[in-house]
Amino acid sequence: MNKIRKASLIELPKFLDKRGNLSFIEEFNQIPFSIARSYWIYDVPGGEIRGGHAYRENEEFIVALSGSFDILIDNGEEVQRFHLNRSYYGLYIPKGLWRSMENFSTNSLALVLASTPYTPEDYIYNYTEFKKTYDKETNSL
Ligand code: TYD
């Protein structure tokens, strides 16, 4: 039986320098998956909510490269809120969790590293379906 997986904050390496700071991410090092895709969310108007869905297979790591926003993670039983506002840490989100993003600050920039190519069939957009099919023991959909 797979263990129950949870979203978790991961601190990234940080090279502080008077010329400016530097952080980085390597697959299977800072994050526990191979990066198949990167995308970013930007120019979000105040009050908008993004990403209300779950993935059957895709895992993600999200960093606030600029500004701040909240990520809400729902495991079918409880909702956790993570506030991201620094570029030297991010949120790892295993597959099978319902996630949404809100409370975007002006000029915020969300970098998302994903474990699979874009696959529309991997999405569950219906919350009732998510609740119905979510298996807490295996965290699979
Ligand atoms: P979508 O995943 O619905 O955004 P959100 O996470 O906020 O719900 O994606 C919005 C649009 O962008 C949708 O038409 C599909 C397209 N898209 C791609 O083509 N490739 C990608 O990697 C992603 C994430 C989205």
Image (cartoon, grey):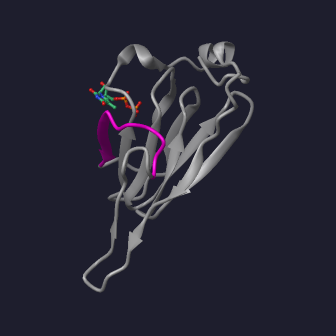
| 12 in relation to 91, above or below | below
Quadrant of image for the N terminus: top right
Q: Which residue is drawn at 66% across and 44% down?
A: 80
- Left/right placement of residue 78 relative to residue 54 reads right
* Left or right position of 12 against 2: left
In the foreground, 12 or 81? 12
Residue with the most extreme bottom position: 18
Q: In which quarter of the image is residue 22?
A: bottom left
* Residue at 31%, 33% in the rendered image: 36
Number of marks drawn: 0
Instruction: From this view, report whether residue 4 is shown above or below residue 14.
Output: above
Residue 139 falls left or right of residue 53: right
Q: Is residue 2 left or right of residue 57?
A: right
| Residue 35 on the magenta segment | yes
**Which of the 4 image quadrants contains residue 58?**
top left
Q: Which of 27 and 141 is in front in this view?
A: 27
The answer to whether residue 108 is magenta is no
Query: Residue 100, how many percent across, how many down?
Result: 52, 37
Kindly tell me whether residue 49 is visible in this rendering.
no
The image position of residue 101, as x and y in percent, is 49, 42
Instruction: Identify the image quadrant of residue 60.
Output: top left
Q: Percent from the top left, x then y, of residue 26?
A: 36, 50
The residue lying at 56 percent from left, 53 percent from top is: 9
Residue range (magenta): 30-42
**Residue 131 in view of the camera:** yes
Q: Which quadrant is the C terminus positioned in?
A: top right
